[in-house]
Image: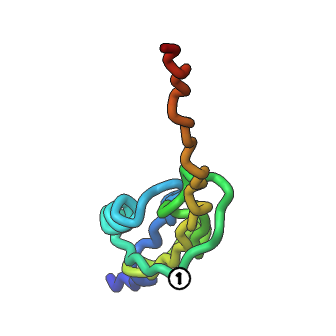
Amino acid sequence: VVFLSSGPEPVEVPDLSGLTSGEAQARLADSDLRYAEAGTRPVDDPGLDGRVVDQSPSAGESVEPGAVITVILGEGPPPTTEPPTTVPPPTVAPTQP
């Protein structure tokens, strides 16, 4: 009897949305997949700064073990800096002689 292998069993790409770079790397390593960053994309939500906002291949796709999953991290808006509030010195009523 001869058995033919069609290669390694494909793995499903996990959803990395919202994960930090380190979390995404760990999740991919657990799935026998490799991590690559393709840069950043501006985001309006400061909570997505430094977090995965896109990935390729997409979550749920089947790929070969060891495949590279490319991610794009969010680059949040710069922190708003409001001018410092200045408080005028208290006024002192002149003393009368």
Under circle 1, the secondary element is strand
Percent x, y of residue 18: 52, 54
Percent x, y of residue 92: 52, 23
Left or right, residue 32 beside residue 6:
left
Residue pictured at 40% horizontal, 66% vertical: 21
Percent x, y of residue 8: 39, 78
Residue pictured at 50% horizontal, 65% vertical: 13
Count of numbered circles on the image? 1
Residue 63 position (above or below residue 21)? below
Q: Nearer the viewer, residue 63 or 15?
A: 15
Residue 93 position (above or below residue 35)? above
Residue 42 position (above or below residue 49)? below
Q: Residue furthest front?
A: 97
- Count neighbours of disc 1 (C-alpha within 10 A) and say few if under 14, some if 14 to 19, many if 20 or more: few
**Amino acid on which disc 1 is placed:** Ala
Examine the image and state in which quarter residue 81 appears: bottom right
Q: Nearer the viewer, residue 8 or 87?
A: 87
Q: Nearer the viewer, residue 52 or 87?
A: 87
Q: Residue furthest top?
A: 97
Residue pictured at 53% horizontal, 82% vertical: 38
Examine the image and state in which quarter residue 40 appears: bottom right
Residue pictured at 47% horizontal, 79% vertical: 37
Split into 4 quadrants, where in the image is the N terminus? bottom left
* Residue holding disc 1: 38
Which colour style is shown?
rainbow
Left or right, residue 45 beside residue 92:
right
